[in-house]
Amino acid sequence: MTKKTALHIISSARGSESFSKGLSSAIVDKLIGNQEIDVVVERDLTKETPPFLHSNLVGAFYKDPRFVEEEERQLLKYADSVVSDVSKADILILGTPMYNLGMSALLKAWIDQLVRYGITYSYNEKGAREGHLNGKKVYLAIASGGRLQDWSGNYEFIASHVKAVFDAYIGLTDVEIFRVEGTAMPGFQPDYQKILENL
């Protein structure tokens, strides 16, 4: 029986106090308990910080690999490692807190390192975009101080953003969302078992 590998991405700066890390770790534990994964590769983005995009890096992203110079090859090391991690994984588990209605800057920077023309996506003869890293399951764990149901407007941007990018630029459409909400409320205690009861 082929062993399945999960890639666990942690993007909260709160360490052991992080609710998004608590929820994503609970997903990992449940998948192990369900015998759905055998190997877990964990990447803590607070310890392995992804570079932010800049002119030289973007230029290297779009350069023909045959003509990439040594300096550019060094710039691409982190991005290449991200693509390698995702390519080898059967399941992705991404954890992020909600900061100012968006995902953590670390997770956004990691995604920016992952998306690569000619590697994770390309365009077919009709001009339609096609993702290349198909067939993987994605779990997204989101922690927020408030609760979406209590907000008057539609302030959900993280799940929709991740789903759109993974569909358009990576080829992954099976994205399941889990939320731990109200973490800023007095006396809050997370019940990860209940949140994941349908997993």
Image (cartoon, helix red, strand yellow):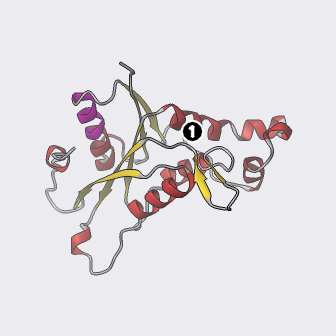
Q: Is residue 32 magenta?
A: yes
Image coordinates for residue 70, horizontal then vertical, percent: 82, 34
Residue placed at 25% from the left, 39% from the top? 26
**6 and 48: which is toward the camera:** 6
Image coordinates for residue 68, horizontal then vertical, percent: 82, 40
Q: Is residue 44 above or below residue 1?
A: below
Q: Secondary structure at mark 1?
A: helix
Name the image quarter holding residue 168: bottom right
Q: Residues within 10 Å of mark 1 (few under 14, many from 20)?
A: some
Q: Is residue 58 above or below residue 41?
A: below
Residue at the bottom extreme, as displayed: 152
Image coordinates for residue 27, horizontal then vertical, percent: 28, 40
Image coordinates for residue 167, horizontal then vertical, percent: 49, 55
Quadrant where the N terminus sits is top left
Name the side, left or right, on which 99 lies relative to 70.
left
Magenta residues span: 26-33
Q: How many marks?
A: 1
Q: Is residue 35 above or below residue 173?
A: above
Name the image quarter holding residue 128: bottom right
**101 and 115: which is toward the camera:** 115
- The dominant secondary structure in magenta is helix
Residue at the top extreme, as displayed: 1
Name the side, left or right, on which 51 lies relative to 138.
right
Quadrant where the C terminus sits is top left
Residue placed at 33% from the left, 29% from the top? 37
Name the side, left or right, on which 73 lies relative to 53.
right
Residue placed at 34% from the left, 24% from the top? 38
Q: Amino acid at mark 1?
A: Val
Name the side, left or right, on which 102 lies relative to 190.
right
**Residue identifier under label 1:** 82
